[in-house]
Image (cartoon, grey):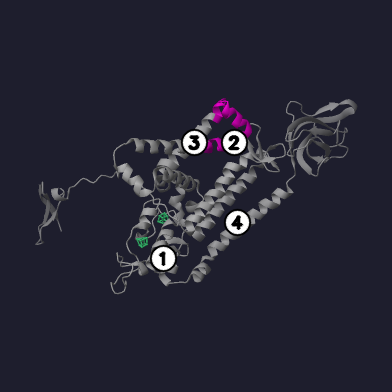
């Protein structure tokens, strides 16, 4: 079949065939009536979340208190003569209560990161975005900033009304007061953050005397600015557009993951009615279409449209809907934490929870438990000092007095305790191998010391070539023994 183009006009391109087929017209110019321009840019709609109270709101506030008491309080805690938790980057020492860690202990940081990642996987598989809804700093600081906003500017309705009107002295005063308090909280947060890396009492003195160093000033203001911007202005935008976790968390969901859901079978058809009305007579479901679940949502979504990636699983809509159900005299749980399977199969809470313990959860839990156990065992067996052996490149093997063969090494001994320690050095691996000088070294608390060590071998003690030897180091004032391998060269 041959097809030829017969006409191209501003109405379209017409095609015909030489055989007796009906003419086809494929329009290439949009009809003017359908040619409305659609902007791909949607202007940001400010969200005014309504405050809410209930079980999940109480949990969220409990987490706000817990995380912030730890964050703001920990740097002020003393451990002996020093700050209990201090990451001293300048001295390359990390103090965590009784532990003194060196950069060589990086493996523990790696372990901590693996544990955090696995915990996130586990909690997400069990209960969706539990982290986002209750413990994420973005949620926690937004909650604090919203609370300040409510105290200064009033609840949702008052804020919306005032924002829709023009500027007035009262509005300017309230906004100004709110921003001043926000800035104070943000700066205190930045200051506390820096207090984990610089002794916080010294930092406080410098802050008061306005003599902070350039790095401390930069990080205090940078962290403070990020807190002010993210919790005061960006809010749900961070969760929706910036947070990478929001993007991949759905990969960890399955049909037995607890999520915030609207029970469509119970709720629909939705509609307003009086408290006394019989919903069955009106052929209505339990949803009274009050829109309170949308008004309390910090990301401004309607959970009745199903699971959406914007939902951070905070449970605010659950709390408010339960209040509505109580007021209407209906059973609670129209919006609730449930699973896809439980909603579809009508499982009871006990049946739902039984299905939560599925293979994926058990595998995550076992791996997590094994890594935590390994970390704890490794930390408890950790030798409280470290030794690095470096052959002195400037002094190769040489013959010294009495025809003995001598090699020189440099040993770095790191004392990871908070008292001065004596270490006894010995060497083994070849017959007659011995240290040429005094073999006890003193290292001050939490310090590292380089020592030059001469090792001698009797003439004819070994054939020419390189031989593996071992340095044996014993802590005399505390417990601990380390063995470090090196090489001894015998010249031809
Ligand atoms: S709060 Fe409950 S009753 Fe009100 S609209 Fe939302 S789902 Fe329906
Ligand atoms: S839909 Fe409900 S649980 Fe999800 S973010 Fe909004 S209020 Fe929170």
**Residue 269 appears at what percent x and percent y?**
30, 67
Of the numbered discs 2 and 3, the one sitting upstream in the chain is 3
Whether tag 4 and tag 3 are in contact, CB under 8 A, the answer is no
Q: Residue at x 37, y 66 (%)?
A: 328
Task: List the residue tagged with mark 2.
Answer: 195
Depth check, mark 4 against mark 2: the one in front is: 2
- Label 2 near ligand 2 (CB < 8 Å): no
Give the answer, above or below, for where 326 lies relative to 445: below
**The disc label shown at residue 368, or none:** 4
Q: Nearer the viewer, residue 28 or 137?
A: 137
Helix, strand or loop at label 4? It is helix
Q: Outermost residue, bottom direction?
A: 281
* Mark 1 and mark 3: Cα distance apart in space: 40 Å
Depth check, mark 2 against mark 3: the one in front is: 3
**The disc label shown at residue 326, or none:** 1
Q: Is residue 481 left or right of residue 314?
A: right
């Amino acid at each position: 079949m041959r097809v030829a183009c017969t006409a191209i006009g501003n109405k379209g391109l017409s095609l015909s065939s030489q055989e007796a087929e009906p003419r086809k017209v494929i329009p290439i110019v949009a009809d003017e009536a359908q040619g409305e321009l659609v902007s791909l840019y949607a202007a940001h709609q400010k969200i005014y979340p309504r405050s809410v109270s209930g079980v999940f709101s109480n949990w969220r506030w409990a987490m706000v208190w817990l995380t912030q008491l730890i964050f703001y309080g920990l740097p002020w805690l003393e451990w002996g003569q020093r700050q209990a938790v201090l990451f001293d980057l300048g001295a390359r020492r990390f103090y965590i209560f009784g532990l003194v860690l060196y950069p060589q202990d990086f493996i523990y940081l790696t372990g901590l990161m693996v544990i955090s990642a696995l915990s996130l996987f586990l909690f997400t598989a069990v209960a969706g975005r539990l982290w986002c809804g209750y413990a994420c700093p973005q949620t926690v600081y937004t909650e604090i900033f919203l609370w300040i906003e409510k105290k200064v500017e009033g609840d949702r309705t008052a804020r919306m009304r005032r924002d829709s009107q023009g500027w007035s002295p009262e509005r300017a005063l309230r906004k100004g007061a709110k921003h001043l308090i926000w800035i104070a909280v943000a700066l205190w947060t930045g200051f506390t953050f820096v207090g984990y890396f610089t002794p916080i009492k010294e930092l406080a003195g410098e802050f008061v005397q306005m003599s902070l160093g350039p790095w401390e000033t930069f990080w205090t203001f940078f962290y403070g600015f990020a807190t002010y911007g993210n919790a005061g202005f960006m809010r749900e935008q961070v969760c929706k557009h910036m947070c990478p976790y929001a993007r991949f968390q759905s990969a960890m969901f399955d049909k037995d993951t607890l999520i915030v859901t609207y029970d469509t079978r119970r709720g629909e058809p939705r509609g307003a009615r009086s408290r006394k009305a019989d919903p069955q007579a009106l052929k209505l479901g339990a949803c009274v279409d009050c829109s309170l679940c949308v008004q309390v949502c910090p990301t401004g979504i309607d959970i009745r449209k199903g699971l959406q990636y914007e939902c951070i699983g905070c449970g605010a809509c659950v709390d408010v809907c339960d209040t509505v159900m109580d007021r209407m005299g209906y059973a609670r749980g129209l919006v609730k934490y449930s699973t896809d399977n439980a909603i579809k199969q009508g499982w009871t809470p006990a049946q739902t929870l039984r299905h939560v313990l599925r293979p994926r959860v058990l595998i995550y839990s076992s791996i997590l438990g094994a890594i935590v156990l390994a970390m704890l065992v490794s930390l408890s067996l950790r030798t409280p000092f470290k030794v690095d052996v470096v052959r002195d490149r400037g002094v190769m093997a040489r013959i010294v007095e009495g025809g003995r063969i001598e090699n020189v090494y440099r040993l770095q001994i790191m004392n990871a305790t908070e008292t001065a320690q004596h270490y006894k050095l010995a060497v083994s691996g070849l017959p007659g191998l011995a240290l040429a000088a005094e073999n006890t070294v003193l290292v001050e608390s939490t310090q590292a010391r380089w020592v030059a060590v001469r090792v001698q071998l009797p003439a004819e003690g070994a054939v020419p070539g390189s031989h593996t030897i071992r340095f044996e180091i014993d802590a005399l004032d505390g417990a601990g023994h380390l063995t470090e391998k090196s090489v001894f060269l015998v010249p031809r």
